[in-house]
Amino acid sequence: MCDRRTIHPSTALVIALVAVVASPRALAQAPADAAPAQDPAEAQPAPRELAVDDDTCLGCHGDDELEPESERGKGLKLYQPEDALAGSAHEGLGCTDCHGGGEEFEEVPHAIDAKRDPLCGSCHDEVMAEYARSVHGAEHAKGEEDPASCTDCHGGHDILPASDRRSLVNKFNLSKTCASCHQNTTMMERHDVGAPQAVAHFIDSMHGKALLVDGLVVAPSCNDCHGVHDILPHENPDSHISKENTPDTCGACHVLVEEVYNKSVHGRLMAAGDPRGPTCKDCHSSHKIGQPTEPEFRLSIDATCGGCHADRLKRYRESFHGKAIALGRANVAACFDCHGHHDIEPSSDPRSHVSAENRLETCARCHPDANPGFAEYLVHSDHTDREGSPQIYWVYVFMTALLIGTFLFFAVHSLLWLVRSAVLYLRDPKTFREAKNKARTDDEEYVRFRPVDRFLHGLVIFSFLLLVVTGMPLKFFDAGWARWLFDLMGGQAVAAVLHRIGAFITIFYFVVHVFTLIMDVWKHRRLFRDPGSGRVTPRQVLRVVFGPDSPMPNLQDLREFWAHQKWFFGKGEKPQFDRWTYWEKFDYFAVFWGVFMIGMSGLIMWIPEVFTTVLPGWTINVALVVHSDEALLAAGFIFTFHFFNVHFRLEKFPMDPIIFSGRISKTELLHERRRQYDRWEREGVLEEKKVKDEWRSWRFIALPAGFLAFVIGVGIVVLIYAAMYSRLVHG
């Protein structure tokens, strides 16, 4: 008996001949007077003339234990039930209609290789002609085995019409069928085919969800865009997804959109054959198409538009809209909110959404109170363009010069001071440490700051840190830590609210401080009277205003500054100061300058519709430059040079608690402010200036809070300098 599980080629031939002779169908067709059968050795019939019918094939392939003998046959499903074609599109066809008869019957497998020489063309000649010209057919013509053949897409014996929901090429199943090859990364790389995640992206896309989740039969599947049997690479001009044909392909479904697009500046560029003209997939992508109303689309569209409009993208990202988008806030104006969607026109065209005629209406979609002045805001303004934006340019030049000049001056000042202190320390470390320790442990202390001063300084610390933490990530939106900080706060919208809270606290402490100044003047109004005449005289007023207890700069500050520089170089004694040093006076008035500059510019950006009723729109652009650069100057100065003067220099490191305690020891007073001590002694108020014990009850709260603020400030300035360095290096 023949073991049909392992078939030798010679054995297969004998079985086939016996099956033909013994076949009831053959006996029925033989004439009654048929001659005796010829000797098989003498008979040489043509292979195609062998009557190999379905029963012959099933004589072997009907055995469910049939296994291939050779390596060539591995992976083949040799067993086929008698009703394999029942219910399929090919029901009624015989085995040899597709498998080619007995021409290669002596070899196993004995059908023509359907992967290399598909016989589907004997019935589907037009389809096979299209396939032969396709990317799949072209690869097969080269002898490649990977590219899809008829059976890879349509199946084998279970082929069903595409309209049948069970069919492999039914539009609801097609993505899975295509994925069998196109999600095979190894295969895609071997044939240099891009987008191995194309099918996965399609399934997650707007089209994929509409088709596979919502079951909308009108939603496209793979073949609606790429074609059926005539699939070609997108580089081929005849491809359905070539740059030239993409609008028509998408327009098959999006008819009205295509009509609008064709009339737009983008469509006209495409019609003229201009390579700069974008098509649907340039903006919407190929497979990851999403709803334009979804946050993901809004957050990515600026980069998409920037692929062609890089210069515009750079300036857009310097605006609040651009920075907020980059930081993940989706409910601010994206490119298409102002320029339109498919109906984009140049700003010079009256039909454009951003033309002079339509700009106010466009702005009013988000800003209902917008006015003509507001609509003059320069969204893509270039602060380096002297000719195009002279107002913004010169403000930028001034603020940059102020920032660089201040930083350079105090950088040199701090460095000289640090070197001088280090030299003194290295000369006699023991004496240096003993003097520092004595200044901190001396029990005899005097009042330097009143409780109200310490309270206001606490508000300064809190509000300033809040403003910097919520504002600097917006300035350095492209730094990795910016997005992290905003996410930590709950997003840019939450940070904006916190920023305004910081602004209100700033206004509060500033108003309270000015009020205390007025009260001090009133309380000490007798000082403005001349001791001789008892009348208020200009000379006496100037003497008080520029006196030692006043933070107003005077000629003595210049003398002390010069003496200090000489001491830095070892050319003179260390100067002794009165109540205020020259650098403290600078810090004091820097706050006044900063509150005014940052406050006014911030107010303009906060309620621009109000200010632009009387001011031109470019005022908003100027306010942005002032607010941004002045804030950077303030943060960099406070956390670097102010911290050095107060905390970092060796005599004070790691922190001087005087602003929290409000008291200064006699040792420190004599060491740094001898002129103040001597003046108090002459005026007979030393005992009056001695402190009480109220500090000790809350020092354990104030000092940790102050140290935490100090650490946060240092951390922020490190991040700021890192971001500035990155921009300097990478542009």
Image (tube, rainbow, N blue to C red):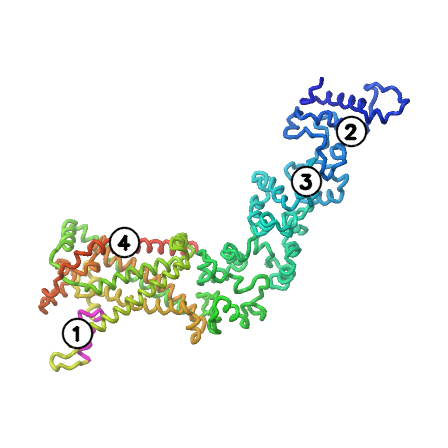
| Label 1 residue SS | loop
Instruction: Name the N-terminal-most of marks 2 and 1.
Output: 2
Percent coordinates x, y for residue 16 in the rendering: 76, 24
How much space separates mark 2 and mark 3, taking CA atoms?
Answer: 24 Å
Q: Is residue 547 magenta?
A: yes
Q: CA distance from mark 4 to mark 1?
A: 37 Å
Which of disc 3 and disc 4 is earlier in sequence?
3
Against 667, residue 373 (above or below) is below
Residue 430 in the image, given as x and y percentages of width and height? 15, 49
Q: Secondary structure at mark 2?
A: loop
Vertical placement of 319 versus 428: above or below? Answer: below
Vertical side of 36 occupied by 339: above or below: below
Q: CA distance from mark 2 to mark 1?
A: 123 Å
Q: Nearer the viewer, residue 621 or 21?
A: 21
| Front-lying residue, 700 or 186 | 700
| Viewer-nearest of discs 1 and 3 | 3
Asked if residue 699 lies left or right of residue 184, the reply is left
Q: Are marks 4 and 3 in contact (CB under 8 Å)?
A: no
Q: CA distance from mark 2 to mark 4?
A: 91 Å
Q: Residue furthest top?
A: 1
Which residue position is annotated with label 4? Answer: 708
Mark 4: secondary structure: helix
Point out residue 543 in the picture as x, y percentages from the top left corner: 18, 75
Kind of residue at badge 1? His
Pointer 2 and pointer 3: residues touching (CB < 8 Å)? no
Q: Which residue is mark 2?
A: 53
Magenta stretch bounds: 538-554
Three-letter code, disc 4? Leu
- Disc 3: which residue: 154
Q: Which residue is mark 1?
A: 524
